[in-house]
Amino acid sequence: MTYDPRIFLFHATPVAMESVCASMKNLWPEAQAVNILDESLSVDRAGEGTQLSESLTRRFLSLGHQAIEGAADGILITCSAFGPAIKRLSAEVQVPVLMPNEAMFRAAMATGDDIGMVATFAPAIDTMEEEFRAFAAQSGSKARLTIVHAPSAIESLRKGDVSNHNRRVAEAAVGLGKRDAIMLAHFSTSRAAETVRAAVPMTILTAPDSAVARMKQLIEGGGY
């Protein structure tokens, strides 16, 4: 491309914004990052349990079409609990739509077959497990995923207690034992990366840097 691409970043919680905006600035400063935040999505998603409703899916899709009207060159989703809606959006628009963890899954599978993940938003766990299995099958990988939940971590982060969030995530990572790699499930969880690396002597992967690098490759490399 000969112009600065416009990448829309979709957030269902404000705690996901800082990490991916930092990754955009560090890894792709020439791109224009445009944020769309609808915090009601995560609030209502938490109340639905494991199944994503059609009503919430339609609300999510409307944001995607809003981005297209805003001349999006790509859409990067930062919330892990909307997998089915993301797939529908990708089928409806003509620009790359990147699922939050796709690039991180790719990096994790390159390390080996025994992968762990720490999640802080419980409603996202089922969809992430399904996405991982589908991506592994598509890639011909035998990788298996074990997910643990770090209770109360995201609530601490929302209250501004980053230290407690990071400690809880690290404790959950330690509980996974030895793995080929451990992924921090959400964009917001990446804040705990250094604390986790200090507690767990193995490969720790985060979503924001992986996702931004993948979107840049898709846009600039013509891979879409």
Image: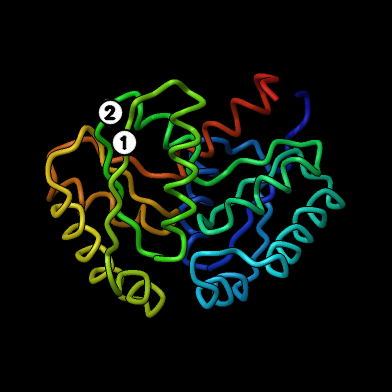
Rendered view: 174 above or below 31: below
Asked which quadrant contains residue 201, the reply is top left
Q: Residue at x 38, y 80 (%)?
A: 159
Residue pointed to by mark 1: 144
Determine whether, in the image, residue 197 is placed left or right of residue 206. left
Asked whether the beta carbons under mark 2 and mark 1 sit within 8 Å of each other, the answer is yes
The amino acid type, in three-letter code, at marker 1 is Arg
Q: Between marks 2 and 1, how big is the CA–CA gap?
A: 6 Å
Determine whether, in the image, residue 221 is placed left or right of residue 194. right
In the image, 158 versus 107, the foreground residue is 107
Other-residue count near label 2 (Cα within 10 Å), few / some / many at <14 / 14–19 / ≥20 = some
Q: Residue at x 63, y 56 (%)?
A: 10
Q: Tell me the quadrant of the picture where the N terminus can be found.
A: top right
The amino acid type, in three-letter code, at marker 2 is Asp
For numbered disc 2, what is the local secondary structure? loop
Residue pointed to by mark 2: 113
Q: Residue at x 25, y 62 (%)?
A: 166
